[in-house]
Amino acid sequence: MSDRKYFGTDGVRGLVGEYPITPKFALKLGWAAGKVLAKSGTQKVIIGKDTRISGYLLETSLEAGLIAAGIDVVLLGPMPTPAVAYLTETFRAEAGIVISASHNPYYDNGIKFFSSKGLKLDDKVELEMEAMLDEKMTCVSSEQLGKAKRLDNADGRYIEFCKSQFPQTLSLDGLKVVVDCANGATYHIAPSVLEELGAEVITYACEPDGININEKCGATHVEALVRKVLETKADVGIAYDGDGDRVMMVDHKGRVFDGDDIVYIMACQAFETNTLGGGVVGTVMSNMGLENALKEKGIEFERSKVGDRYVMELLKQKGWKIGGESSGHILNLDLTSTGDGIISSLQILAAMIAQNKTLEDLGKGFVKYPMNMINVRYPKGTDPTINPEVIQAVQEVEEMLAGKGRVLLRKSGTEPVIRVMVEAEHEKQVFDYSKKIAEVVESVSNQDA
């Protein structure tokens, strides 16, 4: 991604009002995207957004830029990211755009693109858009201008799709579910899906006001959901993030199930029903306990770099279907083309009903290894991970772990920080060994400062 000026692994993202998340840039990006997409015959682009207040500003700017390039625009309003991917494909648009900063606070926002197949755009297309951004903006003649309209009942279409991914022979009758929508894009979708499948639904953080998205709620702040599940004596709790592509769950005792837990349950269910079709992809951050638990069942496990883009790439390379991140991005390519929090949670609920088990019961068999992570700042332009002293410290810890643990040093993608992570069977080892390595990283970083 180093040759890109604007696009990261998940589109363009930043602080609203600061370049590039400004109306002027969004206008030019809409135009540049329209010019590039028009070369391949694109005539129509769908735009969806989450609930943050700046969505109105960016939506209008993108719309104007696309129309100036001669592209028709279909506006969905607030919709989960995976819903935009689905509707792009089913509505036969040539591309889809999501205005969202996912789990970030309201004052951030972002813009990302989907292809006609509901997949992230190829790197080549994004690079062409970046090149076009350097060109002078023009406008097609009046008779060639694009048109804009809103898609009626977009939420209803997606609700029906979600319900179709739940087995017709099963029902959620008798299940009490707390659903936390992070005051985000799933607020008008997820409760309806669950209710229409028969569940008794208790909603939390389903009242967006433009600035409360992800605020002490949702998949990145599950403390309130845990309290609500225990308070209402619910069977299960579900938390989505602001744009609905992440999910976390809580069992009836208040234990949090992260993406690793959800991948484990989903993979085991598929394995038992002979629908797994291969192995499972996690990331370098996936817990070692997940790898061991799956291998004990005879299920292959591979790791990708952090990011659902890389999980997807490895799944396609291996010809597998199920993968995910501990953060709650889950992929099941049998069902969707991208990470979908609602669809993923429905698969776990289906496993609970089909096996007549609680979420707690389904998670048995997967024991997480204790993990500790220490962030160490380092001078820009240096790389402590290749320093001989750091390499030696890592080797010494790995020898002491003797295959019963894992060490990972990873550079942050957004700040000059080395993330020192150690997993081991015993908590004391985790803290002692991670501190040992972090001290060496800090020492060599101070030498380079």
Image: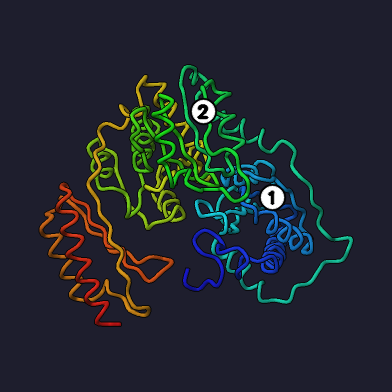
Q: Residue at x 40, y 24 (%)?
A: 233
Q: Nearer the viewer, residue 307 or 109?
A: 109
Q: Nearer the viewer, residue 25 or 314?
A: 25
Nearer to me, 403 or 327 = 327
Kind of element beneath mark 1: strand
Q: Label 1 amino acid? A: Ile
Q: Disc 2 and disc 1: Cα gap in Å?
A: 32 Å
Mark 1 surroundings: few (<14), some (14-19) or many (≥20) residues within 10 A:
many
Residue 119 visible somewhere in the drawing:
yes
**Amino acid residing under circle 2:** Ile
* Residue 302 location (% of width, % of height): 32, 50
Residue depth check, mark 2 versus mark 1: number of the one nearer the observer: 2
Relative depth, front residue between 182 and 230:
230
* Residue 272, disc: none
Horizontally, residue 183 falls left or right of residue 365, namely right
Q: On screen, 395 above or below 275?
A: below
Residue that mark 2 sits on: 202
Give the vertical position of 356 relative to 45 (above or below).
above
Q: Give coordinates of residue 350: x percent, y percent.
A: 44, 26
Q: Quadrant of residue 384?
A: bottom left
Q: Position of residue 291 (x, y in %)?
A: 27, 45
Left or right side of 211 for 280? left
From the top left corner, tell me how far across and down residue 35 is, in percent. Answer: 72, 65
- How would you rate the neighbour count of disc 2 (Cα within 10 Å): few for under 14, some for 14-19, many for 20 or more? some
The residue that disc 1 covers is: 46
- Write the residue at 27% across / 71% down: 385
Asked if residue 192 is positioned above or below residue 182 in the image, the reply reads above
Q: Residue at x 88, y 63 (%)?
A: 142
